[in-house]
Amino acid sequence: MPKSKKKKQPLFNKILIANRGEIACRIIRTCHRLGIKTVAVYSEADARALHVQQADEAVLIGPPPASESYLNGDAIIRAAQQTGAEAVHPGYGFLSENTAFVKACGEAGIVFIGPPVESMERMKNKAQARRLAEEAGLPLLPGSTGAVDDQEALDKALEIGFPVMVKASQGGGGIGIRRVESAAEMPEALARARSLAESAFGSAQVYVEKFLESPSHIEVQVLADHFGKAVHLYERDCSMQRRNQKVIEESPSIKLKKRRRNQMYQAALALVKHIGYANAGTVEFLVDKEGRFYFVEMNTRLQVEHPVTEMITGLDMVELQIRIAAGEHLPFDQDDIERKGHAIEVRIYPEDPKTLLPVSGRLETIELPTDEHIRVDSAIFPGYEITSYYDSLMAKVIAWGKSRDKAIETLSKGLKNFQLPNVTHNIPLILAALDSEEFKKGTFDTLTLSAIVERSNAEAPELSEKEKVAVAAAALSNAFGSSSGQRPSNPWKGYGRISQMNPWSGRGNRW
C-alpha cells in the first residue's frame, strides 16, 4: 500500500475550509493530523455546528441562506485574509467548481486546493467536455459536439434516432435533462430544459445525446500532480440512484470484466493528460448491458463518495489534494497502488418513506455503528437541528469487507444499529436495496432504486391528494435548486444550490 513521503519543507500553516458539515469536518481531521491549523466559516444557522467546534478558528460569513454565506466568495476570501490562511479547500458543492472564485483566490494570493482554473473551465461546459473527450479518444454516445439551437437539436435527434436526451450544457445534478421520445415532443422538451438550465445555471444552452436504456453509472477516480504524473484509484459503481442523485456507491464494480475495466482506466487518464489536469478528479461513464462504456462528464473536485476509494486503497485523498496543491510530486506510481477488499457507501437522509420528501426535526440522541470495518462520516450530534437551508444528508456510512458479500453483511448490520430517534429516515429503504436480488446479483442499474421504491409504495396506502401536491411541489423546488427559482446575479453563485452535496461531517471509527 503506497505511503506519502515526508515533505522536507512544511506544508501550509493554515487552511480555510470553504464549506460546512461532513466534508468540512473530514478536511479538518486530515489537516490536524498533518499539523495544519484550520479556519472554519459558518452561517448564522451553523453557529453551533460541529465543523465550527472542531476548527482552530471560525469566522461568521453571513445569514443562513447559502447565497449569502457559503456561496459568498468575497466574504470567504476576506475571512482567509483576516486569519492568515494560505490556502482554501472547497470540499464539494458550493464554490468547489466555481471558476470565478478560483480566479479570485489566485488574485488574492491564496492557493485553491483543486485543479487549475483552465482545466475546470474546460470541463464545466458539458458540451465542450464531450468535444475534448472525443479529442482524447474516449467513447461517446452519439450526440451533438457542442451547444445547439432548436433546429440543430431536432436535426441531430433525427440523425441519431429517438429516444434522445436534451441536457443543459452547464448542467449538473440531473438538472435540465429531458428525455424525448419523438420529434413532436422536441419543442416542449427544449423549452423546459432551457428554462430549467437558465434558472439553475444561468445559461440556457443545451446539447443532445442518445438515450441509453437502463445503464450503469461507473466512475474512475484520478489524481494528477503539476509535473505530468497521473494515476487512477480504480472505479466506483454509483448506479443505485434516485432522482439522479447517488444513494449507494461501491468499489470495485462487479459488472466489469478485466479488459473493459482497464480500458476505462486508460480512457480516464487519457482525458486527464489531454486537458492538463492536476489534483483530484472523477471521470464518469455510462455502461450498457454489453459492458460498453461512454464518457458522460468529469467532476473537477472531491466527490461525496471518496471514502469508498479511501477504504479500498488506504489512501487519504484530502492529504494528497493538499500535497499536490502545495507543489509536491505524487509520492507513488500506478503499480504502487494496491486495492484490497470491497467497500460500500450509503447516504442517510431524513425523509418520509412514502413521499421521499425531506423532514425536519431535532436529534435528541444518536447511536452510531461501532464495527471496526465501518466508517461513519456525519456532522450530527445530540441536539442537532435538521435545517431546510442546506442539503438534508445526515450521514454517510461506509463498510469494508474482504469480499462484497462480507461488506454487504457488515453494512446491513451496522445500519440496523444506527439509531436516530425522533427523525424519520431512509435506512429501511437502503436495507431493502441491499437485500434486493438486483443488488446482490449485480444486475442493478440507474433505475433499480426507483423500482424498489415503487415496490415498497405498492404495499403502502395510496398518497392523499395533499401528499401528492407536496411531492409535485418538492420536485419543482429541487429542479430549480432554490425556493425562489431566481438565478443568482453574483458571479460566485453560478454553480448554485443544486450542487450542494456537502452539508454534514465525519467522526468515523477509522478516521
Image (spheres, rainbow, N blue to C red):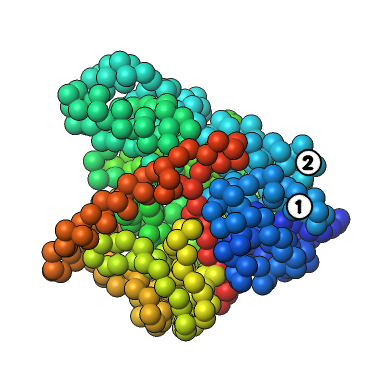
**Tag 2, which secondary structure?**
loop
Q: Quadrant of residue 277?
A: top right
**Label 1: few (<14), some or many (≥20) within 10 Å?**
many
Viewer-nearest residue: 470 or 319: 470
- Residue 108 marker: 2
Q: CA distance from mark 2 to mark 1?
A: 10 Å
**Tag 1, which secondary structure?**
helix
**Label 2: few (<14), some or many (≥20) within 10 Å?**
few
At horizontal 29% and vertical 61% (from top left) the residue drawn is: 356
Instruction: Tell me where residue 433 appears, x and y as whole percent.
Output: 28, 66
| On-image quarter of the N terminus | bottom right
Residue type, label 1: Ala
Res 376 visible: no
In the image, residue 450 above or below residue 459: above
| On-image quarter of the C terminus | bottom right
Instruction: Tell me where residue 397 appears, x and y as whole percent.
Output: 45, 70
Residue that mark 1 sits on: 80
Tell me if label 2 and label 1 are in contact, CB under 8 Å: yes
What residue occupies the far right of the structure in this picture?
A: 9
- Residue 297 marker: none
Viewer-nearest residue: 81 or 431: 81
At horizontal 29% and vertical 36% (from top left) the residue drawn is: 178
Res 392 visible: yes
Q: Quadrant of residue 286?
A: top left
At horizontal 43% and vertical 32% (from top left) the residue drawn is: 198
Q: Is residue 371 left or right of residue 212?
A: right
Instruction: Tell me where residue 69 appears, x and y as whole percent.
Output: 61, 52
Residue type, label 2: Ala
At horizontal 17% and vertical 62% (from top left) the residue drawn is: 463
